[in-house]
């Protein structure tokens, strides 16, 4: 009964808030500056600015734009300090731009292709941005280097190598707290042992490091947190792989002086290969709280014990205060991949509530007594395999959710897709990785392959409203004191909604799919809204059959900035189209044996060019349309010799001439299949002769 009264009270307060949409809530969210990825330390994705509001958002127009030729997947949320925007592009190139005029102030290129070209081999070609503190901009490159840059000039003040395993890379944004900067890394899919490291902002000296999975008995000895974790593993797990690398969100809680780390999946994916028998495999797929000064373990909550589906928990964690059962509670909120929305007590780590925010069949509910999921049977593919929701990309991925203290709602970009998992040989449109054959299942449910923006009430654990998208992989959300929620979508538009009702109040055609989150800042007394438009990243990889919505790799990538009364024009850009203009030389005869071998070799290509060479337009082009891939020599120059290395295309010197020719045969085969299936959409231009 108490919970019902609290819920009714929350609804009443929300109704009152609707009459005052321009009233900011003190102490929560970003102000005139937007200094970090999530806007503030608590990762609310909320701004106190209200110049742009529900009454005038219809007058929002483009103030200026910056074209970004050569960029592909744009996932960063720009930060803004004193009217200057700082953001990263595909290969972690940092730009500083005047926030009122769009003038480029400086540019820094970490040149990973020169320093560590081997790190580009498993590469979604994406970077999620920078952090700012005390006149310094902090960024991280894909090969694991962390940089401190002078905010005025872009000069490198210091750099440090944060990764210790060649399987580890960085795509996430650093976070800052007190006098430190902190960063994690990816690499869990390959079994690399993950960790977070805090460095001194002024010198780059390491302050502390916390591993999120145990190592060998010698490494764990004397460390209570690691000894506790090791007890949940079996066999020689430190040799077969652990994982857990925190590749995205890290949240600082200044009130409790804690760092919250969201950790990734365990690997190999098949739990019997990494840790035979039973065991939860801590601290993978978990939220771990650490002392901000020392990095010492405080508590953990595991969202997926003994993960077997890449259901990581690296997604955004938002610290807030909610009225629950009539009492204020200090909470931490997260919507990880697995489809549940969690509200935790951030003092103890104990779950307060958990509700399904999207389609999730792997578990029925979360047992609030134990905190553990009540799982469906057979989900670790013990028999002939199983189809469950969600697929590996999750119900909610890295795209920012936003919490509005005005409405008490959390605005979460979600998506829906199922996956088939088995221990057998991969089926068509599946791959075998980590001891598991898996692939996204197409349209088992009418909503599969679509997404939505859900306004979630964390007290009632129920939706307040929902806006459906025809596209699945859409951008992050931002809420403002103007009573608005902004979100870009894969359909190529930026939208503004009424934060209370979900009514669409404004939209703008940006000419390119959006996967990043918008942000807002003030300069010269004027409020601006900024967004990076560049479809790609994970959308272009193994999941592209559902995520391919027709954007091409040669489409415009841009930074767009809006303000009330903005009058700047946006040049027309090509509309999205699923037509593939495949190139072919009909005089070439293909050996079926070489084609089959080339298909296996194409697994090197799926992260960027897509499964079965079906690209979603980014981070790399569709090879069926590539003129370079028309000849074995052309493909050899790129794949083996590295002709396009400066543009982020890795070279694979380990492949022989014969193997590259087999890959070429598979590309030619797929191009020919495409032309034969849709001849009306294919170009008639002549192709080079051999």
Image (cartoon, rainbow, N blue to C red):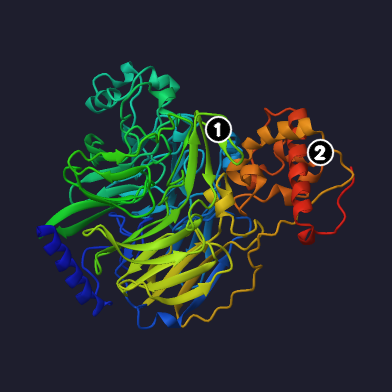
Question: Pointer 2: what residue?
Answer: 633
Q: Residue 648: which quarter of the image? A: top right
Location of residue 202 with respect to 168 vertically, above or below: below
Looking at the rendered structure, the secondary structure element under dot 1 is strand
Query: Residue at point 40% right, 63% down?
Result: 453
State the residue in front, 190 or 309. 309
In this rendering, would 403 be left or right of 624? left
Mark 1 surroundings: few (<14), some (14-19) or many (≥20) residues within 10 A:
some
Name the residue: 46% across, 83% down. 565
Which sits in the foreground, 374 or 478? Answer: 374
Q: Earlier along the polypeptide chain: callout 1 or callout 2?
A: 1
Q: Secondary structure at mark 2?
A: helix
* 149 in relation to 574, above or below: above
The quadrant in which residue 205 appears is top left
Mark 1 lies on residue:
432
In the image, residue 373 above or below residue 656: below
Q: Quadrant of the C terminus?
A: top right
């Amino acid at each position: 009964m108490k919970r019902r009264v609290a819920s009714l009270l929350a609804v009443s307060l929300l109704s009152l808030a609707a009459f005052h949409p321009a009233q900011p809530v003190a102490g929560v969210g970003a102000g005139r500056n937007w200094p970090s990825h999530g806007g503030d330390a608590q990762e609310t994705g909320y701004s106190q600015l209200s110049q742009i509001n529900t009454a005038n958002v219809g007058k929002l127009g483009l103030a200026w734009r910056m074209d970004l030729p050569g960029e592909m997947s744009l996932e960063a949320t720009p930060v803004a300090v004193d009217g200057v925007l700082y953001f990263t592009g595909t290969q972690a190139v940092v730009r500083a731009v005047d926030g009122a005029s769009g003038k480029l102030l400086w540019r820094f290129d970490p040149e990973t292709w020169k320093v560590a070209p081997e790190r580009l081999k498993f590469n979604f070609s994406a970077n999620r941005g920078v952090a700012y503190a005390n006149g310094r901009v902090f960024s991280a490159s894909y090969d694991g280097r962390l940089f401190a840059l002078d905010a005025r000039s872009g000069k490198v003040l210091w750099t440090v190598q944060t990764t210790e395993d060649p399987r580890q890379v960085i795509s996430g944004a650093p976070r800052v707290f007190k006098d430190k900067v902190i960063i994690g890394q990816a690499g869990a899919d390959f079994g690399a042992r993950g960790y977070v490291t805090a460095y001194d902002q002024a010198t780059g000296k390491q302050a502390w490091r916390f591993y999120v999975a145990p190592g060998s008995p010698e490494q764990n000895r004397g460390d209570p947190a690691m000894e506790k974790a090791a007890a949940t593993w079996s066999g020689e797990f430190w040799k077969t792989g652990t994982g857990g690398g925190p590749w995205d969100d890290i949240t600082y809680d200044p009130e409790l002086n804690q760092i919250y780390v969201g950790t990734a999946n365990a690997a190999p994916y098949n739990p019997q290969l990494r840790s035979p028998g039973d065991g939860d495999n801590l601290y993978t797929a978990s939220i771990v709280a650490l002392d901000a000064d020392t990095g010492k373990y405080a508590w953990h909550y595991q969202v997926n014990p003994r993960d077997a589906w890449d259901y990581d928990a690296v997604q955004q964690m938002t610290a807030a205060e909610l009225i629950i059962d009539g009492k204020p509670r200090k909470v931490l909120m997260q919507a990880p991949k697995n489809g549940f929305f969690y509200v935790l007590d951030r003092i103890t780590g104990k779950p307060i509530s958990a509700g399904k925010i999207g389609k999730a069949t792997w578990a029925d509910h979360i047992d609030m007594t134990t905190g553990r999921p009540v799982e469906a049977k057979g989900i670790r593919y013990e028999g002939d395999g199983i189809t469950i929701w969600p697929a590996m990309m999750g119900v909610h991925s890295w795209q920012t959710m936003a919490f509005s203290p005005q409405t008490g709602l959390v605005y979460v970009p979600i998506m829906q897709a199922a996956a088939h998992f088995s221990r057998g040989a991969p089926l068509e449109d599946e791959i075998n990785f980590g001891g598991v054959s898996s692939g996204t299942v197409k349209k088992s449910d009418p909503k599969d392959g679509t997404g939505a923006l859900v306004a979630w009430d964390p007290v009632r654990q129920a939706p307040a409203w929902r806006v459906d998208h025809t596209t699945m992989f859409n951008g992050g959300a931002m809420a403002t004191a103007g009573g608005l929620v902004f979100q870009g979508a894969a359909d190529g538009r930026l939208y503004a909604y009424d934060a209370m009702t979900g009514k669409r109040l404004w939209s703008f055609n940006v000419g390119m799919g959006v996967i990043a989150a918008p942000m807002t800042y003030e300069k010269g007394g004027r409020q601006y809204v900024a967004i990076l438009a560049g479809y790609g990243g994970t959308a272009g990889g193994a999941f592209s059959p559902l995520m391919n919505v027709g954007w091409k790799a040669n489409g415009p990538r841009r930074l767009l900035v809006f303000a009330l009364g903005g009058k700047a024009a946006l040049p027309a850009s090509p509309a999205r189209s699923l037509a593939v203009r495949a190139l072919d030389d009909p005089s070439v005869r293909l050996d079926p044996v070489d084609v089959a071998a080339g298909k296996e070799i194409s697994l090197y290509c799926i992260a960027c060019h897509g499964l079965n060479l079906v690209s979603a337009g980014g981070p790399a082009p569709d090879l069926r349309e590539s003129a370079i891939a028309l000849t074995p020599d052309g493909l050899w120059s790129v794949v083996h010799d590295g002709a396009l290395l400066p543009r982020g295309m890795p070279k694979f010197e380990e492949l022989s001439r014969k193997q590259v020719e087999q890959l070429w045969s598979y590309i030619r085969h797929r191009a020919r299949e495409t032309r034969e299936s849709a001849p009306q959409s294919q170009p008639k231009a002549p192709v080079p002769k051999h």
